[in-house]
Image (spheres, rainbow, N blue to C red):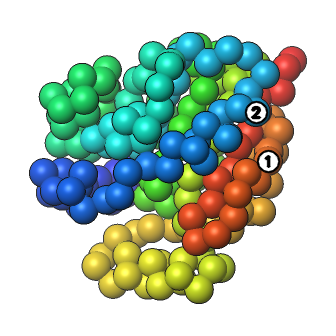
Amino acid sequence: MHGLGDVRFFDRLAPLYDLAMPPADGEALAAGLAHATRPIDRLLDVGGGSGRAAAALAGPEIFVVDASREMLSRARRERGLSAVAGDAGRLPIRDASVDAVTIVDAFHHLPDHGAAIHEISRVLAPGGAVVIREFDPTHPLGRGLVAAEHAIGMSSRFRAPSDLAAALDDAGLDPRIVDRGVGYTVAGVKRKI
């Protein structure tokens, strides 16, 4: 795996992560997934760590990919999820083999945003949706989060909703900003060929 980003931090934090983090926003994720134009039977949770986002979803078969082996161990052991160690920039998943992808509160930790978006587009079947839940660095509270993560040594790179939507569009995904705030949701639907 190249460019592990903040993975060492998450390996150390794994035992406390679910205690420190609030549950994922299932309503925002569902609203983003509702844009898919195909049934969602197989969902890939990229940067899914301990399975926190997967716990907020019901229905599809969920696979977690994360670079932190300690976080994946928790996803398997505590949530019974299928989980594989992998780099978001080189997903260990076949082309057009999943109906949906989620990235929840993790995109800013990925070392290569462009490669991750390309890989998401590659693994999504036509009509499938990606839903990215992130923090807005232009929001006053978002600016505080950026400063806090950098102060503790993280290499986080945050993107505003419109910037992330434009990047999805460039990768062949029809983007929609689902909601805004310090935490926002952007969805993209894989264009049919």
Say few, some or many: other residues with alpha carbon within 10 Å of mark 2 (under 14 / 14 to 19 / 20 or more).
Answer: many
Residue at (38%, 30%) from the top-left corner?
Answer: 64
Q: Is residue 161 left or right of residue 136?
A: right
- The numbered mark, 2 or 1, whose residue comes first in the sequence reads 2
Q: State the residue in front, 148 or 1.
A: 148
Q: Which mark is drawn over residue 35? A: 2
Q: Dot 1 surroundings within 10 Å: few (below 14), some, or many (20 or more)?
A: many
| SS category of the residue bearing label 2 | loop
Q: Is residue 18 visible?
A: yes
Spatial distance from mark 2 to mark 1, Cα to Cα? 9 Å
Which residue sits at x=44%, y=49%? Answer: 24
Task: Tally the numbered discs.
Answer: 2
Residue 176 has which mark?
1
Q: Nearer the viewer, residue 108 or 111?
A: 108
Whole-percent x, y for residue 154 in the image: 35, 71
Please say if the residues under marks 2 and 1 sit with CB atoms less than 8 Å apart.
yes
Task: Tell me the amino acid under the disc marked 2.
Answer: His
Q: Secondary structure at mark 1?
A: strand
Say which residue appears at 65% left-offset and 33% top-offset.
33
Q: Provide residue 38's location: percent of width, then percent of height.
A: 73, 16
Q: Residue furthest right?
A: 193
Q: Is residue 63 above or below residue 50?
A: above
Q: Is residue 111 left or right of residue 79?
A: right
Residue 154's place in the image compared with 29, above or below, is below
Query: For the point 41% across and 34% down, which residue is it?
Result: 54
Image quadrant containing the N terminus: top left
Residue 162: percent from left, percent from top = 77, 62
**Quarter of the image with the C terminus in it:** top right
